[in-house]
Image (cartoon, rainbow, N blue to C red):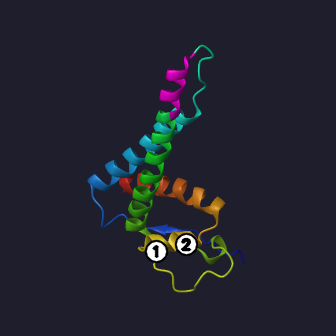
Amino acid sequence: MVKPVDEPRFNFSRVSRRWAKRFSRVQIEMAQRALIIGADARPDLTQAEQQTLNQGRIEAADRIFQLEDERDALLCEVLEYVPGEWLVEGAPDNLDWHDVESLDWVQAGKFDELLQMVGSARQASAKN
């Protein structure tokens, strides 16, 4: 007998189009800010231009931290379940997935996967 795959579950019945727009916009802005941080500087920048660039990178990183918090809160609005195998050792059994702090128990690599899955699940939910 094949054991069913235990995967995270999401419920989009409690969220509106506004939630979907906000979740997408947060993800897009995070990617845009990451581009600012990772962009190669021209070799001919003046010291003042380099300082401006550095300040922009600091501001972009600060904004990403804010957006991560917003994204996590949005995720918890639809997250219903995360398999125990996805959690770090010592995680409590009674995690409330609508509480953002519960996300701290998810393994780092699995959290990235969880973010990909919520986007796919949202698109699949929209088609139904």
Residue 18, given in percent of the width and then of the height, sits at: 27, 53
Q: Vertically, is 50 above or below 122? A: above
Where the N terminus falls, by quadrant?
A: bottom right
Q: Which residues are magenta?
A: 45-54
Whole-angstrom CA distance, mark 1 to mark 2, is: 8 Å
Q: Is residue 47 magenta?
A: yes
**In this view, the mark in front (1 or 2):** 1
| Horizontal side of residue 84 vs 15, given as left or right | right
Question: What's the magenta bit mostly, secondary-structure-wise?
Answer: helix
Q: Which residue is disc 2 drawn over?
A: 82
Q: Identify the element where label 1 is drawn.
A: loop
Where the C terminus falls, by quadrant?
A: bottom left
Residue 50, given in percent of the width and then of the height, sits at: 54, 25
Q: Residues within 10 Å of mark 2 (few under 14, many from 20)?
A: some
Amino acid type, mark 2: Val
Are circles 1 and 2 on residues that touch, CB within 8 Å?
Answer: yes
Q: How many marks?
A: 2
In depth, the one of 51 and 67 nearer the eye is: 51
At 55% from the left and 21% from the top, the residue drawn is: 47
N-terminal of the pair, mark 1 or mark 2, is: 2
Q: Vertically, is 45 above or below 103? A: above
Q: Residue furthest top?
A: 44
Q: Residues within 10 Å of mark 1 (few under 14, many from 20)?
A: some
Residue 13, given in percent of the width and then of the height, sits at: 32, 66
Q: Which residue is disc 1 drawn over?
A: 97
In the rendered image, is residue 64 in sight?
A: yes
Residue 29, given in percent of the width and then of the height, sits at: 42, 41
In the rendered image, is residue 11 in sight?
A: no
At 48% from the left and 35% from the top, the residue drawn is: 55
Amino acid type, mark 1: Trp
